[in-house]
Amino acid sequence: MAKIDLDSLSIEELVALRDNAIAKLAEKVVARQAELAAELEKLSQYGKPAKKSPVAPAVKKAKKSDDVARKNDEASEPIAQAA
């Protein structure tokens, strides 16, 4: 690839270069997405259907009031007496 002297380019030429680079990148992204979608479709025949966007299950945080209630429940249970 030929080197481009960016300092010698006018603003209009730099803008055109930027626009061309953005367009080329967009083309490559679309092509790669199509490749990955085809590969995912091919792989999905071997197992569960593939999810489009995997989401981690929400983790429920314990509240302090739940902690206190659990400790109170444990304390109120009868203790087994030794025979």
Image (cartoon, rainbow, N blue to C red):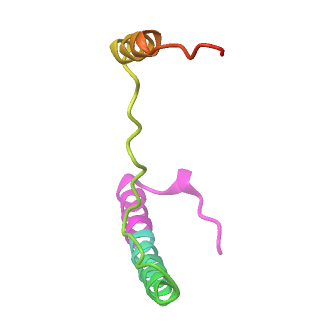
Residue in the picture at 44% in, 66% down: 21
Q: Position of residue 18 (x, y in %)?
A: 41, 60
Vertical order, 46 against 70 (above or below): below
Tally the numbered discs. 0
Q: Residue 35's spot in the image, x, y percent?
A: 48, 84
Q: Position of residue 59 (x, y in %)?
A: 41, 38
Frontmost residue, 60 versus 55: 60
Residue 23: quarter of image: bottom left
Which region of the structure is painted magenta? Answer: 1-23
Reply above or below: 11 against 47. Answer: above
Out of 67 and 42, give the one closest to the viewer.
Answer: 67
Residue that appears at 50% across and 82% down: 47
- The verdict on residue 40 being magenta is no
Image quarter of the C terminus: top right
Give percent across and percent down for residue 43. 52, 85
The reply to whether the magenta stretch includes residue 22 is yes
In the image, residue 63 sits, relative to residue 7, either above or below, namely above
**Figure check: 27 above or below 21:** below
Task: Specify the quadrant that holds the N terminus.
Answer: bottom right
Q: Quadrant of residue 64?
A: top left
Magenta stretch, main secondary structure class: helix
Q: Nearer the viewer, residue 83 or 2?
A: 83
The residue at the point 46 percent across, 15 percent down is 74
